[in-house]
Image (tube, rainbow, N blue to C red):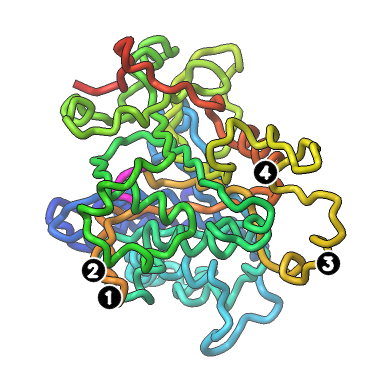
Amino acid sequence: MQQTPVILVNQPRDNGDAEVKNILPNWVMTMPFLRAGRGAMHVKLMLLFYKSGRLRIAIPTANLIDYDWRDIENTAWVQDFPPLNRPIIGKDGNASSFASTLQMVLTKLNIPNALGAMLIDHPNLPLQSVDMLSKGWSFSKATVKLIPSMAGKYEGWHQVLRQGHTALMKAIIDIGAHAGQTKRKARISESELVVECQGSSIGTYSPQWLQEIHSSCSGISPEKWLDKSKASRAKLPTPPIRILFPSLKTVTSSILGTDGGGTMFCRESQWNGANFPRELFHDSNSKRGGVLMHTKVRRTPMLDGGADYLVPFQMILGLWKPKSSPSISSLVTSKGKQIDVWEEEDDTEEDEDEEIQEIEPNAAGWLYVGSHNFTPSAWGNLSGSSFTPIMNITNYELGVLIPLSEKPTVAEKQANELVSWIRPPRKYDLSKGDKAWCQS
């Protein structure tokens, strides 16, 4: 291990300047640029290069600190990618979206400069430059979509669609989990996306931003609303969002007690704010008992299932459900047959419809896992116009989007299996004094 070259990406100093420096033998630390030193380098990402040529990519939700891996429930997405038999020479015009996004992320994190410093003592590194990724490894079987938020200001659709919640929106369209998807719309005309957001840090939520993020989660282009005033958007009904965050009772009754709540952040001033959306809050309870979750989504066994721990991880779940219906399976057809509302009836006329049969991605839901908390600092604020959109992002974040089944009942089962919290989450009983855990 002492001979293994390691590049570590860290939070920049207070001035926010990008830096590269040697910190240990064979270790180089790099820091990306942050405007005015404001924001966080919050990305969790590992690229592990094996002597066999294999590249393993891991996106965990845990910070690189011992208690995140030892005491707190976290999640990791991992996939191996094989080397290409013949590395591509010259420009690669057919780089996959996965590879091109990953290269953009590494460039923003100041990895090119760190690689240059590492190559001085290690000239035979498997990765000689960031743009070699798409030329040296095959990413054609990537099972997820990368969702980045790179700190900065982005103008124009070409840049905006690659960052923050608009990147999430585009990926949701790509997997067919967007509003108005052909097959889903043909089977049920009125549906809504119910979003469950699990995180370890609470943000400032304006009515406009909640509409903004739910619109992207639904795969709806901002072109439909960007030219509308903030005042008019603020008057729209609150979207179906469930913000999952551990209640005071959950933290105090967990194994580690209030000492275990140190990686979850909600201020008293936030919670008591006049316009704070307390009515959207639901308790974050681990399926393994009282452990706090630092996941942002996949369940990972850690400690004895009978124990009580806290769960602070970052995950967002989106499931399409019929509007004003208590459950997916309780609808009845005109023929009196009870069916899953998105499942086809035995109707030959519908089967012969060429539009229904067209090949189009379709998903009844999706799961995001990564570093993003449910905050504007992580997902960005969109402004400007439908002609010239502007995305401002404070933090560096990265995660993956996992498509669920096109069948809602199956998607619901997948969601219940993949997420670490108990579903449905318990809504805070505000009338009885239920409140979020807040650090003093």
Q: What separation in Å lies between label 3 and label 2 (alpha carbons)?
A: 44 Å
Q: Which residue is mark 2?
A: 384
Q: Earlier in the sequence, mark 4 or mark 2?
A: 2
375 in the magenta segment = yes
- Say few, some or many: other residues with alpha carbon within 10 Å of mark 3 (under 14 / 14 to 19 / 20 or more): few
Q: Which residue is mark 4?
A: 408
Q: Which residue is mark 1?
A: 388
Q: Earlier in the sequence, mark 1 or mark 3?
A: 3
Give me the disc on residue 420.
none
Please report the bounds of the magenta region as a residue range: 374-378
The image shows residue 142 at horizontal and vertical percentages of 63, 61
Q: Secondary structure at mark 3?
A: loop
Q: Amino acid at mark 1?
A: Thr
Q: What separation in Å lies between label 1 and label 2 (alpha carbons)?
A: 6 Å
The image shows residue 182 at horizontal and vertical percentages of 64, 63
| One can see residue 408 in this view | yes
Q: Nearer the viewer, residue 103 or 239?
A: 239
Residue at the front extreme? 334
Q: Amino acid at mark 3?
A: Glu
Q: Which residue is mark 3?
A: 352
